[in-house]
Amino acid sequence: MEAKARVHPDCINASNPYHECVDYCFRKIAEAKARDGAEKLDEDQDDGKVPVERTVHPECMNASNPYHDCSEFCFRRIAERKEKSSVVLEKQHKDDISDSKDASTQIQLSPENGLSFHQQNGDADNHVQNEAEEGFPNLTDRQKKLFELRLKMNEARKANQMAMVAEKKKFEGVSESRGVSKEKWLEDRKKKIGKLLDSNGLDLTKAYMLDTQEAAESKYKKWEKDPAPSGWDVFNQKTLYNAYKKRTKKIEVDMDAYHKAKEADPEFYRDASSLQYGKAPKISEDNIDRMVKELQERDAKRNSFSRRRKFHEEKDIDSINDRNEHFNKKIERAFGKYTLEIKNNLERGTALPD
């Protein structure tokens, strides 16, 4: 009980059971009460009151702020705005005069019903003008005309956009020949072959029975032909030996001349102990000419060699020469799948604006 009597309830340490208030605690409590009372008095005085003495221009953009005082910057901005508005009004007045002169000289009658262009579109213009007057009653005549033109432009833009969207939807179902992937082409081919097999009562394993004689012969030729070496296989021993055999097939061997040369020279096949070892035998001019001719033919064939590339006649021509065609192929490989839809839209004429 004594501890409770020595602790003031407003003390910040009142919850401490071992705390006893001293003069410092009572002084702090009195200061806090005085400070709270002063803040409440200030709030009561500020509620609903507006500063009386203020310098605010009625055309200032911050005039609605009850605590704003216009400075030199505000007055300078107001003066600049007035100058700009006066210049714009003068320009509009001159434009109105020139437009009225042009309109008086360009009014023509319609060949269909004898009415002028303004009379034909009078109802629509009056409707738009009424809307402008109802929505923006403070607009000038020049601004109203501009507002009407903008409304008409928006209507035309919407109609054009709707027409393009409708045209795009119309052509969405059309299949595109360009850009068809290989997987899709294989799926379509399998479906066609499957229908033919079903109609003939055959299994998928007997699809070869649907091939014609020419197609079967071309397949067999491809299977019998050895694949061309590629990469480092060009330089291995087997490939070099095959090339040697291919070259020796064209050599014409005269067995009679061979036997005569063998009989005439006892050391036709010399060994290491022969005194004639290393001596070149006599070679006829015909054999030398034949060797030179074979080497020349080989060089000509090497220079004229070119890898066969397939040519598609139905493909669109989009190049001006061979170099440009090669460049277009590289661009198509890199960016073709990203620009396919844009290209098709441009060719159909259904490209939508951004």
Image (spheres, rainbow, N blue to C red):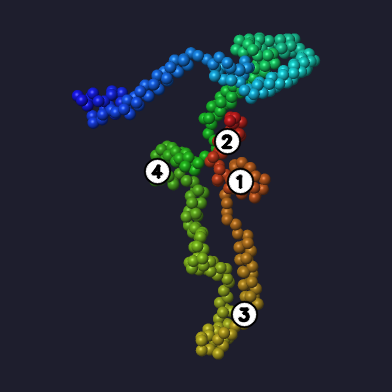
Residue at mark 3 to residue at mark 4: CA–CA distance:
64 Å
In the displayed structure, 69 sits above or below 300; it is: above
In the displayed structure, 320 sits above or below 343; it is: below
**Residue marked by disc 4:** 204
Q: Nearer the viewer, mark 1 or mark 3?
A: 1
Identify which residue, 312 or 148, lies in the foreground. Answer: 148
Residue at mark 1 to residue at mark 3: CA–CA distance:
56 Å
Q: Can residue 287 be seen by looking at this rendering?
A: yes
Residue depicted at x 61% and y 69%: 294
> Which amino acid does the dot numbered 1 rest on?
Asn
Residue at mark 2 to residue at mark 4: CA–CA distance:
40 Å
Q: Which of marks 1 and 4 is in front?
A: 1
Residue 279 lies, in percent from the top left, at: 59, 85
Identify which residue, 237 or 267, lies in the foreground. Answer: 237
Residue at mark 1 to residue at mark 4: CA–CA distance:
40 Å
**Under tag 2, what secondary structure?**
helix
In the displayed structure, 168 sits above or below 294; it is: above
Residue depicted at x 57% and y 84%: 278
**Under tag 1, what secondary structure?**
helix
Going from the N terminus, do you reach mark 2 or mark 4 first? 4
Going from the N terminus, do you reach mark 3 or mark 4 first? 4
Counting every numbered tag in the picture gives 4
Identify which residue, 7 or 137, lies in the foreground. Answer: 7
**Residue marked by disc 2:** 342
Q: In which quarter of the image is the C terminus?
A: top right
**Residue marked by disc 1:** 328
> Which amino acid does the dot numbered 2 rest on?
Ile
